[in-house]
Image (spheres, helix red, strand yellow):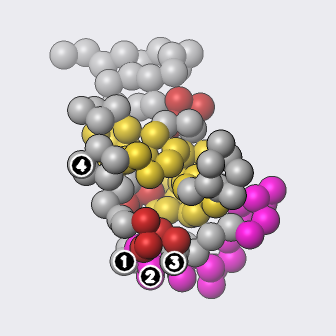
Amino acid sequence: MTEVTDPRLDETLSLIGSDKVEGTPVKRPNGDRLGEIRRVMIEKTTGKVAYAVLTFGGFLSLGEGSYPVPWEKLTYNPKLDAYELDISDDQLRNAPQFVDESAYDVTRAEGRRVNEFFDVPFVF
């Protein structure tokens, strides 16, 4: 089977544009909604996706938090039409969170803390 390679497309068989990822729901394996992906953060020099910013909690975006989730912890599940993350509400409330939602940058120390929380090796 030939893969579509036209770079003008938003999605191919194996690639997806970041604008299509942003706004995608994040659900638990049982289908319960956790939140959605607000941003995908890419490491400038390697081009590797470092983490996704997950919005969680609140009501009608009030009281909603933004959480960096290592990309390795998210799995796209076509049956759910969502990214899957197996985490409880309590675990997520205790996860590292962005205080200033206008800046989604993390220092090396914060990145290490995020990856340790999610049990993912820190490589940056």
Query: Is mark 3 in CB contact (under 8 Å) with mark 2?
Result: no
Distance from the alpha carbon under mark 1 to that under mark 4: 22 Å
- The amino acid on which the numbered mark 3 sits, given as a three-letter code, is Asn
- Viewed as shown, does residue 16 lie left or right of 14? right
Residue found at x 35% / y 65%: 87
Which dot marks residue 93?
Answer: none
Query: Comparing marks 3 and 2, which lies closer to the viewer?
Result: 3
Residue found at x 34% / y 47%: 32
Query: Is mark 2 in CB contact (under 8 Å) with mark 1?
Result: yes
Q: Tell me where residue 14 appears, x and y as whole percent.
A: 34, 31
- Nearer the N terminus, badge 1 or badge 4? 4
Tell me the quadrant of the picture where the C terminus can be found. Answer: bottom right
Q: Which residue is mark 1?
A: 119
- Nearer the N terminus, badge 4 or badge 3? 4
- The amino acid on which the numbered mark 1 sits, given as a three-letter code, is Asp
* Closer to the camera in the image, 29 or 46: 29
Distance from the alpha carbon under mark 4 to that under mark 2: 25 Å
Query: Is mark 1 in CB contact (under 8 Å) with mark 3?
Result: no
Classify residue 109 by image quadrant.
bottom right
Which dot marks residue 30?
Answer: 4
Q: Which residue is mark 2?
A: 116
Dot 2: what SS? helix
The magenta region covers 99-118
Query: Is mark 1 in CB contact (under 8 Å) with mark 4?
Result: no
Distance from the alpha carbon under mark 4 to that under mark 3: 21 Å
Dot 4: what SS? loop
Query: Is mark 4 in CB contact (under 8 Å) with mark 3?
Result: no
Q: Which residue is mark 3?
A: 94
Distance from the alpha carbon under mark 2 to that under mark 1: 5 Å
Mark 4 closeness class: few <14, some 14–19, many ≥20 residues within 10 Å: few
- Nearer the N terminus, badge 1 or badge 3? 3
